[in-house]
Image (cartoon, grey):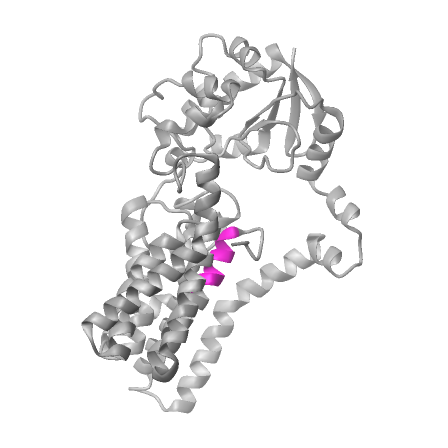
Amino acid sequence: ALAITPRVDMAVAFYLGLMQYALFAALCDGQRARQWLRMSAVLLGLALGVKLTAGVYGAVLFPMVLWVAYKNERSFLAAAKETLIYGGVALLVFSPWLIKNCLISPFPIFPYPFPHHVKEFMEPWLAALYAAQRRLPADNITDITHISTTSGNPMDLFFAPERLWPIGDTSSWTLNLLCLLLPLWVLSWNVSLLNWLLLPSAFYLALFMYVFRRPDMRYFAPIIGPLTIASIEVGQRALARIFSPAVVKKLFLLATAVVLFPTFVMMGVCLKFRPTFSNLSGIISQRQCLKDSDVATVASFINRNLPARSRVLMLFESRGFYYRVPIIQDARGTNWLLLSQLPDPVVKLRSLGVTHVLVNLPAMVYYARLSPRSPYYIREHALRIFIHDHLALQAQGYYFNLYRLK
């Protein structure tokens, strides 16, 4: 499956939202229930093809699939058969992704079940870097977010998402404030459709909060829509016990305007100060749009000036898909933490064939200020010494500095 947007989590939310809609259509339209179930299975397969986290939401909705199948078939055996067909259709749509993995590795969902075998399928120079890894100090940190997050409080989902996940733009994502009305569900617990809308999403939310403690807000994208719709419904039902329908309607129009106001403000800021809309509307060219992008500037320089045999190590940067030369991305923000523990880091880099180092210095400074423990792991001072002693500046931007090994 192809993502409908570069932000794959939005694509997953899109497919899963349609999948859940198809399940509700199957629940309400008995005459075409089977067609709606097939469509739901196709959409689940597409979501899985974009990102495997879709499987978690699919599993949460599995009881609804069983119920829809039983409600329309009125037989346990027929419902079981329909459910197996549902899974088969989803697997068939998902299969191109599995086949592709089997062609490049022995495992269809590589590398998740067998991460210790990953280095067997790497180029020797990259596998050598993994072989050099030692046990990390103190808490055995394997991801920069483990030291920079400070809270696991569910209320941070609404008011302080940066405490849960301080990385990237998802540090400013919040759940809709209307979701604070969800406890009023106890007044409408006997409404079947509302339960199927709310309970799977609430279970998904609780599961991620329990398992990950400090999850990335992007993983909640599939449930924002269902929870918001459920919140509006339970709020309206609660207020209808007190006020007339006309008053309830006005109150919710007011609440909706208040909740959406920050979104409209952010949209205005993005349209005014970012070139994306101007490029889409044709006011400025793609070249002009990219000219203002530090990522595009550095990628263009590397692609134009570095020989094909060059190898670039990224520090505190993980966007490596723009480059034509081999890149070691820093997806977990721990490349420097690993490298700085080696007896002679520069010798190791030379033995691996690394010729250049790309450093996102503002990101490093940002991570180093997030937590009292951060400087111990970020090792900002040690990195600056390493840069001064062993690296020569080759290109400089606002966010990125490109160095070559001396």
In the rendered image, residue 151, in percent from the top left (x then y), is placed at 34, 44
Magenta span: helix, strand or loop, mainly?
helix
Which residue, as the protein is rendered here, is positioned at the far left? Answer: 76
Snapshot quadrant of residue 29: bottom left
Residue plotted at (52% across, 34% down): 366
- Position of 345 with respect to 305 (left or right) is left
Residue plotted at (46% across, 25% down): 378
Can residue 199 be seen here? The reply is no
In the rendered image, residue 49, in percent from the top left (x then y), is placed at 46, 52
In the rendered image, residue 208, in percent from the top left (x then y), is placed at 32, 51
What quarter of the picture does the C terminus occupy?
Answer: top right
Is 218 within the magenta? no
- Seen in the picture, residue 389 relative to 360 is either above or below; the reply is above
Q: Which residues are magenta?
A: 8-16
Residue plotted at (71% across, 25% down): 395
- Position of 302 with respect to 130 (left or right) is right
Q: Could you say which is closer to the camera, residue 175 or residue 285? A: 285
Is 11 within the magenta? yes
